[in-house]
Image (tube, grey):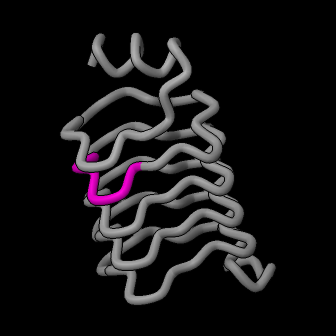
Amino acid sequence: MEDFHQRYAAGERDFSQLDLPGANLSGLDLSGANFNLAKLAGADLSGANLRQTNFNGAILQKANLTGADCSEADLSLADLGFANLTGANLTGANLQMTILFRTRFKNTTMPDGTIR
């Protein structure tokens, strides 16, 4: 986890295939970062800025995305099973073939702008 923060602080934005289950990334500005095929099961991304972030094929099972800004993010092929998306903004996000088994939606802005 410390390595991630150092890499991020140094300006790195490519975290593809990163293995950080249960990581606390709440409130961080991770906009535009690449988490392609990353393993972030159980991670806390609440309140994070994830605008235009690439989560293609990422594992986000049981992740907390409460209040996260995921607008225009690529969540295609991601596993969001049992994730919490309460109050998240998914406007313009790509959810093609995303696993949404038992994902929690409450006051979530969906890709088309509707609130669910």
- Residue 48, percent across and down? 60, 38
Q: Residue at x 50, y 58 (%)?
A: 54
Q: Residue at x 69, y 66 (%)?
A: 72
Q: Main secondary structure of the magenta part?
A: loop
Q: Is residue 81 magenta?
A: no
Q: Residue at x 22, y 49 (%)?
A: 39
Of 104 and 63, the residue lying toward us? 63
Question: Is 52 situated above or below 113?
Answer: above
- Residue 38, percent across and down? 28, 51
In this rendering, does residue 100 appear at all?
no
Of 74 and 21, the residue lying toward us? 74
**Quadrant location of the C terminus?**
bottom right
In this rendering, does residue 82 appear at all?
yes
- Residue 97, percent across and down? 38, 88
Question: Is 105 situated above or below 6?
Answer: below
**Quadrant location of the N terminus?**
top left
- Residue 87, percent across and down? 66, 57
- Magenta region, residue range: 35-40
Of 63 and 32, the residue lying toward us? 32
Question: Is 28 situated above or below 50?
Answer: above
